[in-house]
Amino acid sequence: MKHHYKNKQGFTLAEVLITLGIIGVVAALTLPVLISNYRKSIVETRLKRVSSVLSNVMQFAVNDNGESKNWETVNSKIFIERYLIPYLPGSKFISEAELGKMYVYGINGSKIELNGGYASGLKLKNGELIRVVNGFDPNSTIGLVQIGVIISQNKSNIYYFGKDYFTFYYDINKDSVLLYEYYSCKSDRNTLIQRCGLYGHDSACMALIVCNGWKIPKDYPIRF
């Protein structure tokens, strides 16, 4: 009986190298996009969560202490200890000295230390850091409390407006958290894009994201 064997050939070294090269090119093209999309999704998820946390906490504080327009004037430290920490189990107070080690940069090269404005902070159990600026004053002409948010801390303590750091506001007269100040979803889009990432107290970046259904838009001026 005769046995017939098929000629089995493996891949040549050249073919293997070509295949690996193609895989490398595809990975080089797609990996940065995947990483960028992942970073964006983290920002979107955490911003929305912080917004919900702040709104709920301030509502609890109002329920227990009455309308905020009737609260006494206090600095950031006391405001956090009195109106935030009691409703945020697992959170940790961040002193002005600790904030002084953290820096936020704008896309134009501007820089601020996070302890500016006599600020104190609070780190949530999920990792976000809340910064309260200039304390609480119900007699303030603007009637707002500035609340900065670092999405997640890093070892370098260097952050960027509109990428790692965003600004919310608490409206004293309405007992509500504002997602953006002086803007609306009808604001001129070019203005929002031009201002996003320039200033720490500006909420143009928040307006762009919130008005896009809590998604970072394609024309967002800051890369991830």
Image: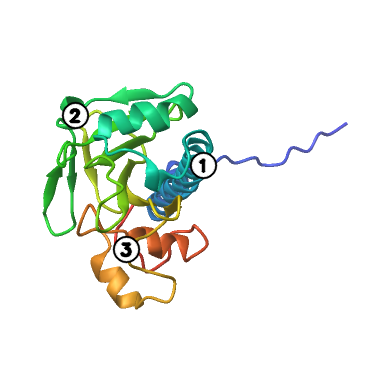
Q: Residues within 10 Å of mark 2 (few under 14, many from 20)?
A: some
Q: Position of residue 148 (x, y in %)?
A: 30, 44
Question: Residue at horizontal 30%, vertical 77%?
Answer: 190
Mark 1: amino acid: Gln
Q: Residue 204 has which mark? A: 3
Determine crowd level at label 3: few under 14, some 14-19, many 20+ residues with C-alpha closer than 10 A.
Answer: many
Q: Is residue 205 above or below residue 72?
A: below
Using the image, determine if residue 193 lies above or below residue 123.
below
> Which residue is identified by label 1?
59
* Mark toward the start of the polypeptide (3 vs 2): 2
Residue 5 lies in quadrant: top right
- Dot 2 corresponds to which residue? 96
From the viewer's side, name the closer residue of 134 and 186.
134
Q: Amino acid at mark 2?
A: Glu
Q: Residue 218: image x %, image y %?
A: 41, 66
Query: Reading the chain from its start, which is encountered first: label 3 or label 1?
Result: 1
Sequence-first tag of 1 and 2 = 1
